[in-house]
Image (cartoon, rainbow, N blue to C red):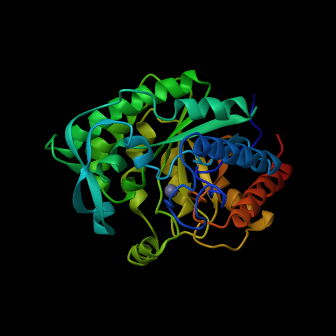
Amino acid sequence: MSLPLFPTTLAGSLPKPAWLAEPEKLWAAWKHEGSALQAAKEDAAQLWLKIQEDAGIDTVTDGEQFRMHFVHGFMEQLQGIDWQKKTKMGIRDNRYVVDVPTVTAAVARPKAVHVADAKFTRAHTKRQLKITLPGPMTICDTVADGHYGRRADMAMAFAAVLNQEARELQAAGVDVIQFDEPAFNVFMGEVNEWGIAALEKAAEGLTCKTAVHICYGYGIEANNKWKETLGEQWQQYDQIFPALNKSRIGQVSLECAGSKVPISLIRHLADKQILVGVIDVADQRIETPEQVAAILEAALEHADKERVHACTNCGLAPFPKGVAAAKLNALGAGAALARKKHAR
Ligand code: ZN
């Protein structure tokens, strides 16, 4: 299925309905167990597919309804991680101090993690389907190393198991596999040393579309405070986009709505499709179609129109369900408005 000009998609996550998990809370506990939980997750995914389709989203996701946490949801199914052995670690360069599980042996993936759920989702939409996975660097920043000794080595080990999963997702009919790397604007030196190499290893051999989502995080307090320290213009991407542009990853997702990322930085991504964030995830006010279209217009000053896609800044999971749905509508309407003006 060919995509229109300014195709629309979302970073990934959407709020869990109140009957699945406590709303407006990140990583809230499930309200069911066993087969009842699975049925509830499937209902939630189908509900969000319908909302996305009605909003005119071209590449939809399962809204991450099947997992509680975007990193742990994948890691929980791996071998080599001791979840009882918690280590206190300041993650994202000490932005949050949390108890993280510890890698105590070589990591392995004894079975598929998200593949069955992706097949379910695939069966319930004709739109292009994107499934997200945590990127290797971000995994390494969310787990303590008691085995490998070097973060780069641990990242390559996680990249290998991510690649197994990604290949099975592709075989299940997934059109876009996106790796989430919020650690990419925190450890810029390491991104160039091994982060991009690990990302490419995770995506090795894939023939479907591949994407990387880099971001400054959900609009939660710890992130908002961190953002205040980053200065008037967030120039971090200057340091990593040139190398990212040389990578084999096809799409780069970044936040442009209400953020201090100068949109001119997308000039460094001349060979990529750019998922321009046009929906703010730190503000519950609903964008107007005109505001969305204006950001796409600004992107056109630095990238040809065929490479500009419309996306959310980050996941919409922390919002009330109605806000997330209204923001998806604004995304669809804003892209349609821009399309009208720039029709091929
Ligand atoms: Zn994000």
Residue 117 drawn above or below residue 61: above
Q: Quadrant of residue 77?
A: top left
Question: As drawn, is 196 to the left or to the right of 218?
Answer: left
* Residue at left offset 32%, top offset 55%: 188
- Where's the N terminus, which quadrant? top right
At 30% from the left and 46% from the top, the residue drawn is 192
Identify the image quadrant of the C terminus.
top right
Front residue (pair 222, 337): 222
Q: Does 285 sit left or right of 207 as displayed?
A: right
Q: Is residue 123 above or below residue 9?
A: above
Residue 139, given in percent of the width and then of the height, sits at: 34, 47
Foreground pick, 303 / 277: 277
Q: How many marks?
A: 0
Residue 302 appearing in the image: no
Residue 339 appears left or right of 16:
right
Q: Residue 239, position in %: x, y?
A: 36, 55
> Farthest residue in the right direction?
340
Q: Which residue occupies 47% across, 50% down? A: 70
- In the rendering, at what x and y percent does residue 311 appear? 64, 52
Q: Residue at x 32, y 44 (%)?
A: 195
